[in-house]
Amino acid sequence: KYGNLNNNRFFGMRHGEATHNQQDKIASGRESATLRSELTVKGFERVQKVVPELKKQKIDIIVASPYYRAEQTAKIIAKQLKIKVVIDKRLAEINCGIYNWQPVSAYFKFFNNKMERFTRAPEKAEDLSEVRSRVISCLRDLNQKYKNKNILIISHGDPLWILEGAARGQTEPEYLEQ
């Protein structure tokens, strides 16, 4: 939960476990029919398990990343709650550029330290400062568009912890402590 903004309540949720998680690979950048990550059986089951809690929160709308695994997660929840899903590309996974579909460890080896992720990016990628700008932009726009709504944001690990840190007014080192 990100708290109340303009009488809206925002909740963040990561997509369910997906095939790339099992393979320990990065799944960012452009998706295609043959190159995308989708929910695993375990991911699907875990998403189903959170639906009763989301019902208690009286979610009015779901705003999700355009990645297939996030859309799958959103549609499972939306069907049960009988609400609509809005896709917003600003909630997309961090673009890891040349490390897309490579082992997660290879991406992290690119950086000399964790703080560099905010200021340095591999070729054709974005840094965490760019991620922060786009997710904050999304949150601000949602807050202007809706009033007195319970909004569930379905995204990915990095965009969500960056969004949470920004909503709390944290500094970059504080983000990394999460």
Image (cartoon, grey):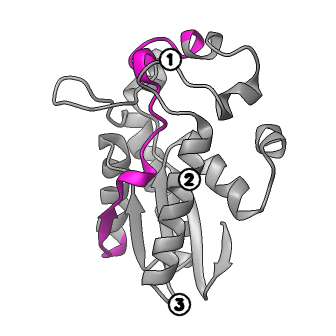
Q: Specify which label sits upstream in the sequence, 2 or 3.
A: 2
Q: Secondary structure at mark 2?
A: helix
Closer to the camera, 54 or 10? 10
Q: CA gap, disc 2 to disc 3?
A: 24 Å
Choose between 63 and 21: the one closer to the eye: 63
State the SS at label 3: loop
- From the viewer's side, name the closer residue of 60 and 2: 2
Residue 24, disc: 1
Say above or below: 124 vs 144: above
Q: Is residue 52 visible?
A: no
- Residue at 33% x, 30% y is 37
**Eye-nearest disc, 1 or 3:** 3
Q: Which residue is mark 2?
A: 133
The quarter of the displayed image where residue 53 is located: bottom right
Q: Secondary structure at mark 1?
A: loop
Horizontal and vertical percent for residue 172? Answer: 77, 43
Q: Left or right: where does residue 124 sit relative to residue 120?
A: left
Q: To which residue does mark 3 refer?
A: 148
Q: Is residue 35 left or right of residue 21?
A: left
Question: How far is disc 1 from disc 2 in space, using C-alphas?
Answer: 27 Å
| Sequence-first disc among 1 and 2 | 1
Other-residue count near label 2 (Cα within 10 Å), few / some / many at <14 / 14–19 / ≥20: some
Amino acid of disc 3: Asn
Q: Is residue 31 left or right of residue 53?
A: left
Which amino acid type corresponds to the residue marked 1 in the rendered image? Asp
- Say whether residue 143 is visible: yes
Q: Does 87 appear in magenta?
A: yes
Q: Which residues, given as a range, are shown in magenta?
A: 81-106
If the image is split into quadrants, where does the C terminus sit?
A: top right
Is 16 colored magenta in this rendering?
A: no
Are the residues flagged by discs 1 and 2 in contact, CB closer than 8 Å?
no
Callout 2 touching callout 3 (CB < 8 Å): no
